Amino acid sequence: MEEVLLQCAQVLWDFSRLNQILRRSEVMIVLGNDDPRCAQHAADLFLEGWTDFVLISGKEGTGTRGKLPMNKTEADVFCEIMVSKGVPFDRIFLELEATNTGENIRFSQRMLERTGLIIRSVMLVTKSLMERRAALTFQKQWVASEKVHLCVSSPPLSLMEYPSSCVGTMDEVVVFLMEIFEKFTDYAECGHQAAVEIPGHVQRAYSILAAQKHRKCWH
């Protein structure tokens, strides 16, 4: 991929991340996906003492459909990884029906309400390029989200470190970054996530990538 396109992808990558300072939270919600590094990162955070309870949410989504082990959900797979790293199984709740980020948030809140827990602080763990979109989705989909302190975390990876056999090649990652960028506007307009102001340089970076993708000039 040409250097100028990688520079544009880096701009989208940086905008997609929040790089927040962590705060100890009453529950960690792990959003199921196709990157096992998320489960490993969540296990590390739990073992470091950032929370006492974990809720893993996810049945299957666009990134995992047809790729999961037989009769396993995203949540099942992540749970196995976290338990193998030392997280006690009795500290984990499993939400097994969500198929997108909005459902991850809504279904997780309903499950936690049924436990009787009063949640005032939540840590979301998601993919490295999904931090901002996860936070915006939480703001819209979690009932009374303004009363909850939210922090978001993800595996500490750079754009160059992110491609893998699970999430795809650099070209595929850049396409996914573009799709995430498009959802900042599209999903806000239809009420799926909170709105966010797009800086001019980020919009320009996306436009350059979109033009090159249309011309099929990735390399």
Image (cartoon, rainbow, N blue to C red):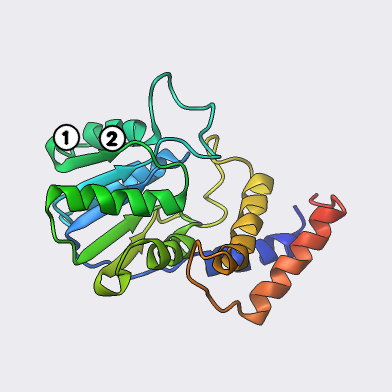
Residue 48, image x and y in percent? Answer: 18, 53
Relative side of 4 to 133, left or right: right
* Mark 1 element type: helix
Give the residue number, with chain letter if any, for mark 1: 89
Q: Position of residue 22 (x, y in %)?
A: 27, 66
Please tell me in which quadrant of the rendered image residue 182 appears.
bottom right
Which residue position is annotated with label 2?
79
The residue under label 1 is which amino acid type? Answer: Phe
Decide: few, some or many residues near mark 1? Use Cα within 10 Å; few <14, some 14-19, many ≥20.
Answer: few
The answer to whether 183 appears left or right of 156 in the picture is right
Tell me where residue 178 sits by quadrant: bottom right
Relative depth, front residue between 104 and 168: 104
The residue closer to the viewer here, 45 or 190, is 190
Q: Are marks 2 and 1 in contact (CB under 8 Å)?
A: yes
Tag 2: Cα neighbours inside 10 Å, few (<14), some, or many (≥20)? many
Image: 97 above or below 209: above
Residue nearest the observer in this picture, 140 or 22: 140
Q: Tell me, yes or no, if residue 110 can be seen here.
A: yes
Residue 98: x percent and y percent? 40, 42
Q: Nearer the viewer, residue 33 or 128?
A: 33
